[in-house]
Amino acid sequence: MSRILIAALALGAFTASAAVSQNGATLNDAKIAHIAYTAGAIDIAAGKQALAKSNNKTVRDFASEMVRDHAAVNDQAVALLKKLGVTPESNPTSDALSKQASAETAKLSKLKGAEFDRAYLANEIAYHRTVNSALHDTLIPGASNGELKSLLSTGLTLFTEHQVHAEHLAKALR
């Protein structure tokens, strides 16, 4: 129950902070890129944590998929930003995401076995819902560069598949 509340609060905070920066100015492509990259890096770290802790083959396979897919999208983002000459800008949203991820990593580190697997998948579901909503509602519409919009849209399609996959795995582990 508390995970659902945390996910709802995170979604609200993520979307609200993504829409407006600390100074009240709308986000620019450099800040959007930093948020998207940070979100991917967080899921890579979560996947690596699951690979280190889980003994469940389906959970490990899913975690490997998260590491592979999010790393590929982040690599594409870095290449695009280099091509465009854009330097990602840290911002309150990416900072908040990192802080929240550190807390979740600490919570998950205390769990073992099936309890870890269920909590990891629940976190993946909540996290993908949050990120997918922010991509759809704020980051993609807020991006001004067409290539960045396209990459974010491709990411949204892939990350929506991740969410569905995590939901199916979570049901199977009950």
Image (cartoon, grey):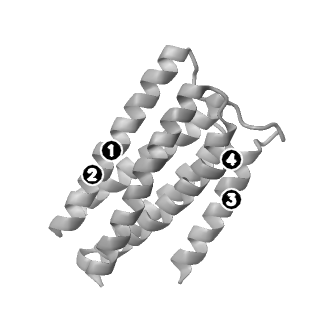
- Residue 97: horizontal and vertical position, in percent? 56, 52
* Numbered disc 2: secondary structure: helix
Q: CA distance from mark 4 to mark 2?
A: 27 Å
Can the viewer see residue 111 in this picture? no
The residue singled out by tag 1 in the image is 69
Residue shown at 73%/47% (left/top)?
19
Residue sitting nearer the eye, 37 or 163: 163
Q: Which numbered dot is residue 65?
A: 2
Q: Are marks 2 and 1 in contact (CB under 8 Å)?
A: yes
| Looking at the image, residue 134 lies above or below residue 87 | below
> What element does badge 1 sit on?
helix
Q: Which mark is residue 24?
A: none
Q: Callout 4: few (<14), some (14-19), or many (20+) C-alpha neighbours within 10 Å?
A: many
Q: CA distance from mark 1 to mark 4?
A: 23 Å
Look at the numbered disc 4 and give the secondary structure of its residue. helix
Quadrant of the drawing holding the C terminus: bottom left
Badge number at residue 18: 4
User: Does residue 84 lie above or below 158 as drawn?
Assistant: above
